[in-house]
Image (cartoon, grey):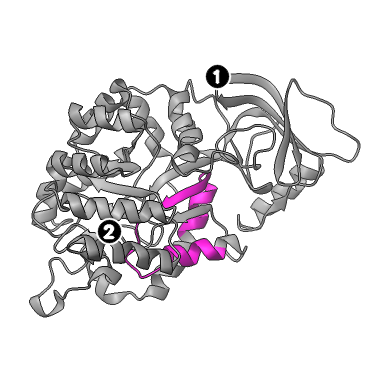
């Protein structure tokens, strides 16, 4: 069939080549994950008109004479996946701390472009790029993808994080004194509500889509505490109010309880990690509709690396050994409590392209497989305010469609081996087994 042959050619050419769905494209799905209401459908036909879904029909409906046909009868189809926490320009390693002194912004931009393609080939058609420390690489790669210069997912970019002096995202932490300068609000370090407003407005000026703050200490920064609160209430209020005035959501990195609660109380849109989340915070998040992005992969990764002598500086290793193992338990409690959860991995800590490994961890933490898929589709669209066009397979929605070879209800690890990727009506990957 013409559609399949074109898709096969795209894969043969190395993945960056693509196939544009023609007006009148028909996709046959052996199974289809319907995310609202949540259930698995059998034997479905998806009709496309250009880059949008025109209909989803029960059974394998006959194509018109001129229709392109894509046969996914042996596969399980679902909406394009979304990762709410990635760092495209970075990938942690034992020498990562030296890269601040050896790499330039251009180097980070090239890395971001390479990793964007890996992310799309893993089935993730939209991501939130939550903080680059390379002065705009995330914004540059977003623009290049939008213009068709680079292959990758839709990128919702925050630019550099906002921190306080000595906070988790203060990039001068751990340096010798003459390099431990005050970078100020433009560089993402603020003290007081006036500087907080300036930092938000600077990111708006830079072209960011959203704001990322480090509400508490973190694991991988060379600073003593991994959980202390790092903003005062007036600073958080200034950030959130200013960001929301500009239509920019706010994501809050947070491990410790007090700083997390302050951020939720101030009105942030999501909490990233949430390691020491207590019931008081869960109640407030549930009441306000604040999303949790659990990043279980990052917790497991830092826990594993903390056992390798010399991989982390001792200050980092001690934090990783404590915080990493707690994240799964917090996820389970938050899920059972009913906190809204959106899929996110913190990829860039772990390797790019492995984003799908979070699914198995979420299921191990008690979430049902289809609920985990919904967290990476509809929930991601709701969090990013793109749910009018993305997050489900329905008439009028953009044609972001992925497929796996097996039934994720039986083997959730099939989500680590996405076999078919279409973004915006364009086929980028098709390695589905066909008889």
Residue at image coords 20%, 38%: 275
The magenta-colored residue range is 115-144
Crowding around mark 2 (Cα neighbors within 10 Å: few <14, some 14 to 19, many 20+) is: some
Q: In this view, does 264 lie to the left or right of 90?
A: left
Q: Is residue 125 left or right of residue 333?
A: right
Q: Nearer the viewer, residue 83 or 233?
A: 233
Crowding around mark 1 (Cα neighbors within 10 Å: few <14, some 14 to 19, many 20+) is: few
Q: Which of 277 and 66 is in front in this view?
A: 277
Q: In which quarter of the image is residue 277?
A: top left
Q: Is mark 1 on a helix, strand or loop?
A: strand
Quadrant for the N terminus, please: top right
Residue at image coords 56%, 61%: 145
Q: Please say whether residue 81 is one of the residues in the magenta stretch.
A: no
Alpha carbon separation for disc pair 1 and 2? 40 Å
Q: Position of residue 255 (x, y in %)?
A: 19, 43
Q: In which quarter of the image is residue 388?
A: top right
Q: In which quarter of the image is residue 144?
A: bottom right
Q: Do the residues labelled 1 and 2 touch (CB within 8 Å)?
A: no
Q: Work out whether mark 1 precedes mark 2 in sequence or the reverse, and give the earlier one.
A: 1
Q: Is residue 409 left or right of residue 70?
A: left
The residue that disc 2 covers is 93
Q: In this view, does 115 lie to the left or right of 19?
A: left
Residue at image coords 55%, 27%: 406
Q: Is residue 214 visible?
A: no
Q: Where is residue 49 in the image (x, y as percent from the top left)?
A: 77, 42
Q: Nearer the viewer, mark 1 or mark 2?
A: 1
Q: Please say whether residue 119 is one of the residues in the magenta stretch.
A: yes
The disc placed on residue 128 is: none
The residue that disc 1 covers is 39
């Amino acid at each position: 069939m013409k559609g399949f042959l074109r898709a096969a050619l795209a894969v043969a050419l190395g993945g960056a080549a693509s196939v544009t769905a023609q007006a009148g494209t028909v996709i046959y799905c052996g199974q289809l994950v319907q995310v609202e209401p949540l259930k698995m459908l059998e034997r479905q036909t998806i009709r496309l008109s250009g880059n949008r879904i025109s209909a989803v029909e029960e059974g394998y409906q006959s194509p018109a004479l001129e229709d392109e046909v894509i046969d996914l009868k042996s596969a399980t189809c679902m909406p394009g996946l979304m990762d709410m926490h990635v760092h495209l320009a970075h990938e942690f390693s034992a020498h990562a701390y030296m890269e601040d002194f050896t790499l330039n912004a251009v180097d980070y931009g090239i890395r971001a472009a390479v990793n964007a393609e890996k992310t799309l080939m893993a089935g993730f058609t939209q991501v939130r790029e939550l903080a680059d420390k390379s002065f705009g690489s995330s914004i540059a790669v977003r623009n290049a993808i939008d213009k068709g210069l680079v292959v990758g997912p839709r990128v919702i970019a925050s630019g550099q994080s906002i921190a306080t002096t000595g906070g988790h995202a203060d990039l001068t932490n751990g340096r010798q004194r003459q390099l431990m300068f005050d970078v100020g609000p433009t560089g993402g370090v603020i003290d007081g509500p006036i500087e907080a407003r300036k930092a938000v407005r600077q990111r708006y000026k830079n072209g960011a889509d959203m704001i990322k703050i480090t509400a508490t200490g973190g694991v991988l920064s060379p600073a003593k505490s991994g959980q202390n609160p790092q903003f005062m209430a007036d600073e958080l209020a200034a950030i959130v109010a200013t960001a929301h005035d500009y239509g920019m959501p706010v994501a809050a990195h947070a491990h410790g309880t007090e700083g997390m609660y302050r951020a939720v109380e101030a009105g942030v849109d999501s909490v990233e990690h949430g390691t020491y989340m207590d019931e008081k915070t869960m109640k407030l998040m549930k009441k306000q509709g604040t999303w949790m992005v659990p990043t279980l992969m990052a917790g497991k990764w830092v826990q594993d690396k903390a056992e390798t002598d010399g991989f982390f500086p001792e200050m980092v290793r001690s934090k990783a050994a404590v915080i990493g193992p707690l994240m799964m338990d917090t996820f389970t409690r938050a899920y059972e409590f009913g906190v809204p959860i959106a899929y996110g991995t913190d990829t860039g800590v772990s390797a790019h392209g492995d984003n799908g490994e979070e699914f198995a961890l979420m299921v191990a933490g008690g979430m049902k497989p289809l609920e985990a898929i919904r967290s990476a589709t509809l929930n991601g669209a709701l969090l990013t305010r793109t749910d009018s066009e993305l997050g489900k397979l329905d008439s009028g929605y953009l044609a972001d469609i992925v497929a796996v070879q097996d039934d994720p209800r039986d083997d959730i690890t099939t989500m680590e081996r996405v076999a078919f990727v279409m973004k915006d009506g364009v086929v980028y990957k098709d390695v589905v087994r066909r008889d």
